[in-house]
Image (tube, grey):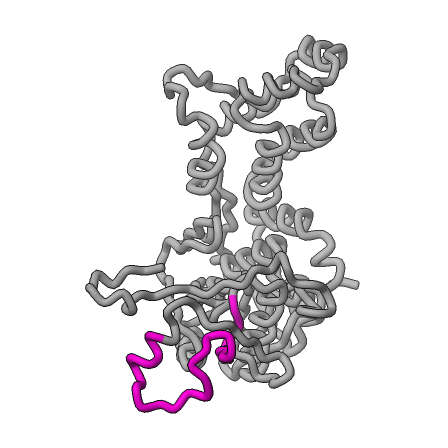
Amino acid sequence: MKDTSTPNHFDLYARTCADGSIQKENVDFTDSYSPVGSIDSIRILLNIAASAGLLISILDISNAFQNSIIFDASECVYLSLPPLYLDWFRQQWPDYDLPSLNVKDLVIQCLKSIQGTKDAGQRWYKLLAACLLALKMIRCSCDHGVFIWNLPTETCFLAIETDDILFISKTRTPFLQLKSELEKLFDLTVCEGSILKFLHLQIIQSPFGVSFDQTTHIKNTILHDYFKEILATSIPCQLYPFPIDASFERHLYKAPPLSGLDLVNVTKCFRFSFGHLVGGLMHITQVSRPNLSYSVMRYAGYMACPNLPIFEALHTTLCYLYHHPHLPIMYPSCTTKNTTWTMHTHWKTGFAESIMETTWPPLQMQTLPLAFVLAGPFLQTFMY
């Protein structure tokens, strides 16, 4: 509820949300999956932007799930009248002849979807994808959150993350055209410039290339709550994210798993459950911190039955992360003349041929395999 600072209690803004927990599959909804661009796809697109010298821009659509217009009459949603709604309606339109003055006899038909329903994400994706396909964009066959837009003068790429859109183009003209088309249906905000915020990523583009990191997310989401009651001077600086002493491995092997009251006490001592902390590390490892992969792999083996040494090792990893929160991944730009790009009409074949026809400078070869390895299944779909 939003107060408008007026004495009239009717002048309030409220967001209507459905209780999705009472919905039943195949009765109140059918599909709930909403495709989004995978992090592998996003990393490949950032690599393309850096290599080809393309511009990166962000579009953020406001209140996406409330903007999903219902076109099918069979999918209409009706609401019972909220408290005081009938009084407000009669105050606004006193001459309107209502069929009944009993609140229980009246309903409201929704022209747009309601947040909270199980299929809200699917409805939103269908609407946004229809808008993009109407602009003659081509949807990626292996990642439905990625689109390619072939224009007479250039080729643009687009990745969808629910209501956030990552747009890559050679010039600003296609971006302004897309912005103009989407503004006809939605309220949106634009983010352009050298420093961009996209989901939990900070993207920096410069003549030297494109980098991205999760430094702000790591500090605010993982480290802040864990170390908020600990003095910064008392947090030891760790050189490695996981203990490398052989004696630790013997101690870890011999320690019994924690259970019952012992597990509760150790969890209180470390302030968070083992699974909660490891889950946060798994996320950043997959997105931007591959240097934590070995540590997360070891912790994953103790998710069901952690012991005291693995809790202590997890604390070591968090101390390492506290002193090394900023570790961006950089894709350098290709500025030499022996780099050529050929964009094709079909996304599945065109993307693969564009990569294979590029002559990479020797000093810049080191970053390309990283994207290929981390996005293996994505590229295999294109290559074979």
Queried whether the magenta region covers residue 95, the answer comes back as yes
Whether residue 71 can be seen here: yes
Q: Is 7 left or right of 321, judged from the image as shown?
A: left
Image quadrant where one finds the N terminus:
bottom left
Q: Residue at x 68, y 8 (%)?
A: 247
Of residues 181 and 23, the one drawn nearer to the viewer in this rendering: 23
Residue occupying the point 44% across, 68% down: 82
Give the total number of marks visible in the rendering.
0
Q: Residue at x 48, y 78 (%)?
A: 108
Q: Is residue 149 visible?
A: no
In the rendered image, residue 326 lying in the magenta stretch gets the answer no
The x and y percentages for residue 313 are: 61, 20
Of residues 24 and 272, the one drawn nearer to the viewer in this rendering: 24
> Is the C terminus in the top left, top right, bottom left or bottom right quadrant?
bottom right
Give the residue drawn at x 64%, y 59%.
22
Residue 301: where, in percent of width, then height?
Answer: 74, 29
Vertical comparison of 175 with 214: above or below = below
**Which residue range is magenta in the image?**
87-114
Along the line of sight, the residue nearer the viewer: 351 or 198:
198
Vertically, is 269 above or below 153? above
> For the view shown, which residue lies furthest in the right direction?
384
Residue 146 in the image: above or below residue 309: below
Q: Considering only vertical position in the picture, is 147 above or below 368?
A: below
Q: Position of residue 287 (x, y in %)?
A: 57, 46
Where does the image place residue 129, in percent across and percent down from the top left?
58, 75
Nearer to the camera, 5 or 302:
5
